[in-house]
């Protein structure tokens, strides 16, 4: 009875917060329940007749979880779709989804142990670990250690889906029975070498440098240690014959134990091939068919703000979220297939962006700087960003520093031809602010409105 | 003039945008007609005293730092000789810790350092994270400010004989209590501040270049021609305002 009262109170507050226009109410009711009675979350999760699954990673949580939900299609889901991935956001999704059968939750990498304890998922996907907002999360090894203890406490019946291409993540599953290992298998897509910001370059077993037969995204790839012989495990689910088609799309051949499929994605970049392969692996592990996977991934449009094309005044604004070196490097690589004449980059430094902005120096912007016509540096740390570009080799006449996001957007739009794209790379809060500006002009829907077709 | 830079363990210690510091030194040297030649000094490479005019060592995650620490400790004698002969040096964060006597872990273990700076670091329970503003006086009468970002669990205690790099105006600094930040020994500077440090503190980059040129020529540090530094000043202004508003409280 108490649970019913609490959830209806929380629901009411969510409706009020949406009515007041404050950020979609995606976490407020959850925060309330979380404060009133955290154990209620366990009880709500236990009511899900088909159980719960969890997704965590440094990069790609929201996209992967969205892909998974699309694959699972007609099931009734409790899903924290707006990327609210702390316990309060999970609580909100549970409160909002009356009668849901299956829980699909993305979980912040720091919140993973608590979420595991409360949600008791039947399957968990661990995608990747990159250095990310060191001021907020601390060093990569601290997160890895938390994940190790969390995995050690899992019941044996929990299926673990891991990225075999990430040495630390793959090693988490080394001693477990129910494991699905996924990865990429297409040396044509490998980078020439490890990038500057590559993280897990040293053997998890003995500390010697890994040799990478293929390095795909950051340190993700086909690695082996010459000193002790540790190597990437055999893939259960693999993406092969990958074709990247600029900003528009990609396709690949998915090979699994239960069949193969040609996957069409309306999303750019190798990192989204990882996300799709991850989502497919988890979906198959909980009983989806390979046909569900194929059609679900084909239907999937990008998650809120991660990659969006917004028509405005005869042009399109393309928003590509950047938040850490590995993710930003992949965005840069995607743009290299056709370097835009004008690039807006917006750097804010709120808690959600990372207060420490030094990460922009670990991004390999250089391949773009040689060819881009104009970079407009914007956001609260526009000057810092401008310096990054100048010291990276951009000539002064090709740089404009415009801290105001709205002015930078208009300046950018005025510099691209009608019918073409303005590429904008914002950090998280800059993306929210840009979206609000575009929404004010009627160009985008608020993100809490369902976007499914 | 060629300025020879030895970059210690760039493959291991590169986490806080250390290459930004190198990029700033390279460009500011070039704008004055000097060429910065950067060579890596890795594990098992000999650090030959006198072979470099400027040494740079950055920060890494704990795991990477532990991998190179024994090698760095072995380079201690050569480092001290090079410093005594007037090499300029910048050590940031983990590199700054490792150049002291050593690091005491929470479990009581002791990881010996290179013994260049007269300090010792002990693991703390709470990380000291945030924007920092310092006041410093590297040259008598030349009081300057430095803005950066710190993120460290280690608490570094200077010996009474050691000279701090600066006085903390906002932020935690070496240990969160002494009000000291960093360490200065002749032409060598160690600090927790990254961000990276040099793009928004261009005067400090120029100071290091002048010290390196002094080592290269065997004469006094030259005065370098001023640069406009408009964007640099703006970046400093914003970073300093951040430190005032949200720097760590001692």
Image: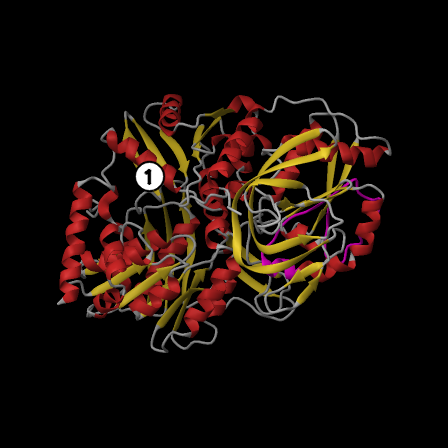
Q: Nearer the viewer, residue A267 or B95?
A: B95
> Residue shown at 21%/39% (left/top)?
A21
> Residue shown at 15%/66% (left/top)?
A2
Pinpoint residue B37: horizontal percent, then vertical percent: 74, 38
Q: Where is the N terminus of chain A found, in terms of image quarters?
A: bottom left
Decide whether residue B48 is among the magenta residues: yes
Q: Nearer the viewer, residue A190 or A78?
A: A78
Q: Nearer the viewer, residue A297 or B102?
A: B102
Pinpoint residue A201: horizontal percent, then vertical percent: 58, 58
> Which chain does the residue under circle 1 lie in?
A
> Residue shown at 38%/57% (left/top)?
A108
> Residue shown at 46%/51% (left/top)?
A136
Query: In the structure shown, which secondary structural element does the residue marked by tag 1 occupy?
Result: helix
Question: Seen in the image, is A211 located left or right of residue A340?
Answer: right
Classify B74 as above or below B82. Answer: below
Decide whether residue A429 is among the magenta residues: no
Residues in magenta, as a range: B40-67
- Mark 1 Cα-neighbour bin, 10 Å: few <14, some 14–19, many ≥20: some
């Amino acid at each position: 009875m108490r649970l019913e009262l609490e959830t209806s109170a929380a629901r009411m507050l969510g409706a009020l917060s949406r009515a007041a226009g404050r950020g979609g109410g995606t976490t407020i009711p959850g925060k309330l329940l979380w404060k009133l009675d955290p154990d209620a979350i366990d009880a709500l999760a236990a009511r899900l007749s088909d159980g719960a699954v969890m997704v965590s990673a440094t990069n790609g949580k929201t996209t992967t979880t969205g892909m998974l939900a699309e694959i699972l299609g007609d099931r009734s889901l409790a899903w924290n779709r707006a990327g609210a991935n702390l316990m309060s956001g999970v609580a909100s999704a549970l409160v909002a989804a009356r009668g849901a059968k299956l829980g699909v939750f993305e979980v912040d990498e720091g919140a993973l142990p608590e979420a595991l304890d409360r949600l008791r998922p039947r399957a968990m996907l661990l995608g990747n670990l990159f250095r990310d907002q060191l001021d907020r999360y601390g060093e990569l090894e601290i997160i890895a250690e938390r994940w190790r203890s969390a995995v050690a406490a899992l019941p044996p019946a929990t299926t673990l889906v891991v990225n075999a291409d990430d040495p630390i993540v793959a090693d988490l599953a080394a001693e477990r029975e129910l494991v699905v290992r996924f990865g990429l298998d297409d040396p044509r897509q490998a980078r020439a070498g490890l990038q500057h910001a590559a993280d897990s370059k040293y053997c998890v077993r003995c500390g010697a440098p890994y040799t990478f037969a293929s390095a795909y995204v950051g340190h993700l790839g086909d690695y082996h240690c010459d000193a002790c012989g540790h190597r990437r495990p055999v893939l259960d689910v693999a993406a092969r014959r990958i074709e990247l088609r600029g900003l528009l799309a990609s396709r690949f051949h998915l090979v699994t134990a239960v069949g193969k499929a040609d996957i069409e994605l309306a999303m750019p970049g190798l990192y989204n091939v990882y996300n799709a392969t991850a989502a497919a692996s988890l979906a198959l592990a909980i009983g989806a068919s390979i046909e569900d996977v194929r059609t679900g991934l084909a239907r999937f449009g990008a998650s809120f703000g991660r990659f969006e094309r917004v028509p405005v005044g005869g042009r399109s604004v393309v928003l590509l979220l950047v938040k850490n070196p590995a993710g930003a490097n992949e965005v840069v690589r995607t743009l290299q297939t056709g370097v835009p004449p004008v690039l807006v980059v917006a750097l804010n430094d709120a808690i959600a962006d990372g207060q420490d902005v030094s990460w922009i120096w670990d991004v390999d912007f250089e391949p773009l700087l040689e060819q881009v016509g104009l970079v407009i540096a914007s956001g609260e740390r526009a000057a810092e960003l401008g310096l990054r570009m100048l010291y990276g080799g951009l000539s002064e006449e090709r740089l404009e520093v415009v801290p105001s996001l709205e002015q930078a957007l208009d300046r950018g739009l005025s510099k691209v031809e009608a019918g073409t794209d303005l590429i904008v790379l914002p950090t998280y809060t800059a993306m929210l602010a840009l979206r609000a500006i575009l929404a004010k002009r009627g160009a985008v829907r608020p993100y809490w409105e369902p976007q499914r077709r | 003039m060629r300025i020879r830079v030895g970059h210690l363990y760039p493959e291991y210690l590169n986490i806080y945008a250390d290459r930004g510091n190198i990029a700033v030194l390279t460009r500011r040297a070039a704008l004055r007609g000097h060429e910065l030649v950067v060579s890596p000094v890795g594990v098992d490479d000999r650090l030959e005293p006198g072979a470099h005019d400027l040494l740079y060592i950055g920060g890494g995650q704990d795991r990477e730092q532990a991998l190179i620490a024994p090698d760095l400790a072995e380079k201690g004698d050569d480092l001290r000789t090079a410093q005594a002969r007037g090499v300029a040096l910048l050590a940031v964060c983990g590199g700054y810790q490792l150049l002291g006597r050593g690091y005491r872990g929470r479990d009581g273990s002791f990881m010996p350092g290179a013994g260049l700076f007269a300090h010792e670091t002990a693991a703390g329970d709470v990380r000291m994270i945030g924007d920092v503003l310092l006041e410093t006086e590297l040259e008598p009468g030349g009081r300057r400010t430095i803005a950066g970002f710190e993120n460290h669990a280690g608490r570094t205690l200077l010996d009474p004989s050691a000279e701090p790099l600066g006085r903390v105006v906002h932020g935690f600094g070496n240990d969160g209590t002494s009000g000291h930040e960093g360490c200065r020994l002749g032409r060598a500077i160690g600090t927790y501040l990254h961000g990276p440090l040099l793009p928004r503190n261009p005067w400090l980059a120029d100071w290091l270049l002048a010290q390196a040129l002094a080592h290269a020529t065997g004469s006094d540090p030259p005065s370098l021609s001023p640069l406009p530094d408009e964007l640099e000043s703006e970046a400093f202004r914003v970073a300093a305002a951040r430190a005032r508003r949200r720097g760590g409280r001692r």
